[in-house]
Amino acid sequence: MSGNAAGLPVISVVMSVYNGKQFLAKAIESILGQTFRNFEFIIINDGSTDGSSAILEEYAQRDSRIRLINRENRGLIASLNEGIASARGEWIARMDADDISLPDRFEKQLAWLQQTGTDVCGGWVKLTGTWLHRVWRYYGSGDAIRIKLLFGSAFAHPAVMLRASLAKANPYSGSAHYVEDYELWTRLAGFGAKMTNYPGVVLRYRIHPGQVTAIRQKQQRENMVQIFRDYSSSFLGGDLANDPAYLLIADKQLAIDEAGFYRAVAFMHGIISRFGDSEGVVSTNAFIFFTRCGGLGLMKVMREMRGFRIRPFQKMVLLFLLLMAAEPNSGIYRFLYRLR
């Protein structure tokens, strides 16, 4: 994958910037410093007012691979669709203005796409901007990813690379605000796109207070619940598709009573019976579900836990949370949940 016909770039990197001055230079440098160099870097300056424009202009003059588009603010979804529509490469690589791509990210992902014959490739990310520099590991197989999409996104959005033809034919939905990536992955899965994640860290993902405000969280949750309904209906089929227990697992803000608890456990066993438990996806989400059931009693939860592949450390975390009867909004719950 060293070049395209007519001298076109292999990769089109698409990044939207809105008031991203604080971390912008490091993000740009991480792309320009890639070991794989045959790419164009499409940056949409989405009406920034904080000094980002001057930084972008300076880099655009310095490196001819940057294609800078300056315009008024239209929002992330419109910006990403605009950048993808103008892309000339065979592959689209996503990037955010506050993250850092590792130097060999493109090289590794292109090789992995070629090896696996897939259409969409993410990768693991290491957290930065937080004292706990965890690595978020994402499922690698297509089977695991399709099951994971029942419970949330299976990719780190800024770490994704996908076929440009696929991205152009399936733009981000203008109604999926704050979950535009998750909605796209479920839609592509429904079309039969082949998906994978590179089994290694490709990006440093920054955690900071300005990512999703409390005001936006309400709309984010409403849109996620709609995606849960749409994707489960198309993917599960049969009796599982309309099982009300599903949302008790997927929507982590719902209260769980005893009857709902047993229905949800039966639902998860039904998924395993029909689809298997590739890479332990269902078991991991069973663990997350059980952590929210502290008010139902230790023995009840521990007894049902035996039917899933839950790791020893997760069992320790779960035991402690259940003994404490920790609520999901409590500080001890959030701390231990991060260590899972």
Image (cartoon, helix red, strand yellow):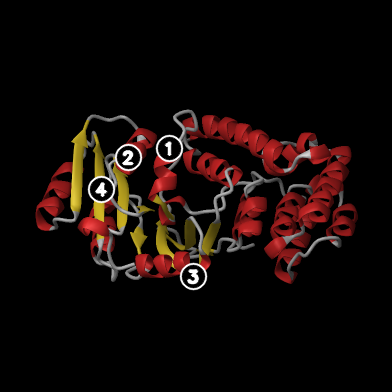
Residue plotted at (31% across, 37% down): 82
Figure check: 268 above or below 122: above
Instruction: Residue 192: give its label.
Output: none
User: Crowding at label 4, few (<14), some or many (≥20) Cα neighbours within 10 Å?
Assistant: many
Circle 1: residue type: Pro
Q: Nearer the viewer, mark 4 or mark 1?
A: 1
How many angstroms separate mark 4 from mark 1 (CA)?
16 Å
Foreground label between 1 and 3: 3
Taking 329 as reference, is 63 above or below it? below
Q: Position of residue 150 (x, y in %)?
A: 66, 45
On residue 115, which mark appears? 3
Mark before the other along the chain sequence, 3 or 4: 4
Q: Name the residue carrying label 4.
A: 42
> Is label 2 or label 4 in front?
2
| Mark 2 and mark 4: Cα distance apart in space | 11 Å
Q: Amino acid at mark 2?
A: Ala
Corner quadrant of residue 254: top right
Judged from the image, the secondary structure of the residue bearing numbered disc 2 is helix
Q: Which residue is mark 2?
A: 85
Q: Is residue 300 above or below residue 227?
A: below
Q: Which residue is mark 1?
A: 171
Dot 3 amino acid type:
Gln
At label 1, counting other C-alpha atoms closer than 10 Å, the crowd grade (few under 14, some 14-19, many 20 or more) is: some
Task: Please tell me which residue is depicted at 36% across the width and 38% down the height of the picture.
Answer: 81
| Classed neighbour count for the residue bearing mark 3: other residues with Cα under 10 Å, few (<14), some (14–19), many (≥20) | few
Q: Residues within 10 Å of mark 2 (few under 14, many from 20)?
A: some
Q: Is 203 or 188 nearer to us in this picture? A: 188
